[in-house]
Image: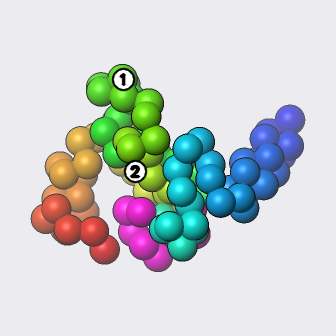
Amino acid sequence: RTRQYARNRRARLAGAVMDGVAVDYFAKMCFWCQRAPAECIDHIYPLAVSRDDRAANKVPACSACNRAKHTSDPVEWMARQGRNGRLA
């Protein structure tokens, strides 16, 4: 069952739009690290905190960044990564 879920997720990502996010705009790369291919959609401001599920709050992310950021505030998380509010 989890293999099928992963296959379906990759198939959705292959399209131009995934969960309302224009994945092609980000060249199918992770919004956070801009090094790894995007594998999922991450909320910029965590859904658990903001309750904002609009496309404007979603970006493509690699699974490593998505897991590492979890429910962190994006600015604080980037500062912890040594980026001081700057993307990669």
Residue at x-position 38% and y-position 62%: 32
Mark 2 vs 1, N-terminal side: 1
The answer to whether residue 63 is seen in the rendering is no
**Number of marks in picture:** 2
Residue 31, located in which quarter of the rendered image?
bottom left
Residue at x-position 42% and y-position 72%: 34
Residue 79 versus residue 5 in the image, above or below: below
User: Mark 2 falls on what kind of element?
Assistant: helix
Tag of residue 51: 1
The answer to whether residue 14 is seen in the rendering is yes
- Specify the quadrant that holds the C terminus: bottom left
Residue at x-position 48% and y-position 68%: 26
Tag of residue 8: none
Magenta span of residues? 31-38
The residue wearing badge 2 is 68
Q: Is residue 78 left or right of residue 53?
A: left
User: Mark 1 falls on what kind of element?
Assistant: loop
- Amino acid found under the numbered disc labelled 1: Arg
Q: Is residue 46 left or right of residue 24?
A: left
